[in-house]
Amino acid sequence: MTSLTTCADAGTVAERAALHVAAVLERARAERGVAHLALSGGTTPGLTYELLARQPVDLADTRLWFADERCVGPQDEESNYHLAVQTGLAGGAVPEERVNRMEGELGPREGAERYSELLAATVEPGAGSLPVLDLVILGIGPDGHVASLFPSSPALRAPEDQLCLGVDDSPKPPPERITLSLSVLRAARGCLLLATGAGKADAVDAMLGEPSQHVPASLLRRERLTVILDDAAAPGDPPR
């Protein structure tokens, strides 16, 4: 069953999220000696990364991955890797040799192939032979998309053994992206979804409804999903 927590504001969401991430990483290190954490872009995840970066001890033996990336260079303001660097997480609290960025500058197909090879070679597989990340941090779009898996996209019907996908028709600019597949997100030991603002309330409500390819977030494994929201993004009647 999905764990859902609401908070007063975006700052409190980030604080709760940072505590959750730290606890998951500590448990992973204790059980397996290494922790694999995948990052997404966005304002609320960025606040969480800033808080995590202030406690580098919580990130010991952690390898950073990315849930998706825009096909831009690593210094581009649109880059999720660039966000992780700017917040002090990638290359700061987590040394660069433990940061595995998606090479967006290679384009969607070659970039996805390279990342698939790196994941397969680095992250231990689970029972279904897919690499198992310990935690994936996700945002949610107003349309219900997560990572770069958009509503009714063919990417949602990719073969189960496909790890990363190239996207060349994103409805949000830029159109070319790289994303982890739905099967990799579902194979992760946990996903942490963060949402703030009234503009996300309908998407959160739809995510908690019946699974549908029209709402990619609804296809995540509910029993492995933790959702942290602010009051404005909570489903149901808007706050007064």
Image: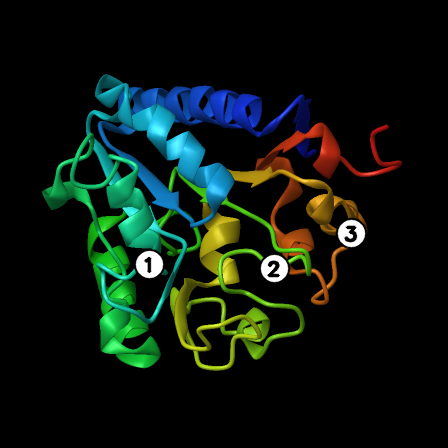
Q: As drawn, which residue projects farthest toward the left?
A: 97
Q: Residue at x 80, y 38 (%)?
A: 235
- Identify the residue position indicated by label 1 in the image: 79
Q: Which mark is residue 206?
A: 3
- Residue flagged by tag 3: what amino acid is it? Ala
Q: Quadrant of the C terminus?
A: top right
From this viewpoint, is residue 124 visible?
A: no
Neighbor class of circle 2 (other Cα within 10 Å; few <14, some 14-19, many 20+) is: many
Q: Residue at x 50, y 38 (%)?
A: 44
Element under disc 1: loop
Q: Which mark is residue 145?
A: 2
Q: Residue at x 50, y 64 (%)?
A: 148
Residue 207 to residue 111: above or below: above
- Give the CA separation, mark 3 to mark 1: 28 Å
Q: How is the image coloured?
A: rainbow
Element under disc 3: helix
Depth order, front residue of 44/125: 44
- Give the CA separation, mark 1 to mark 2: 18 Å
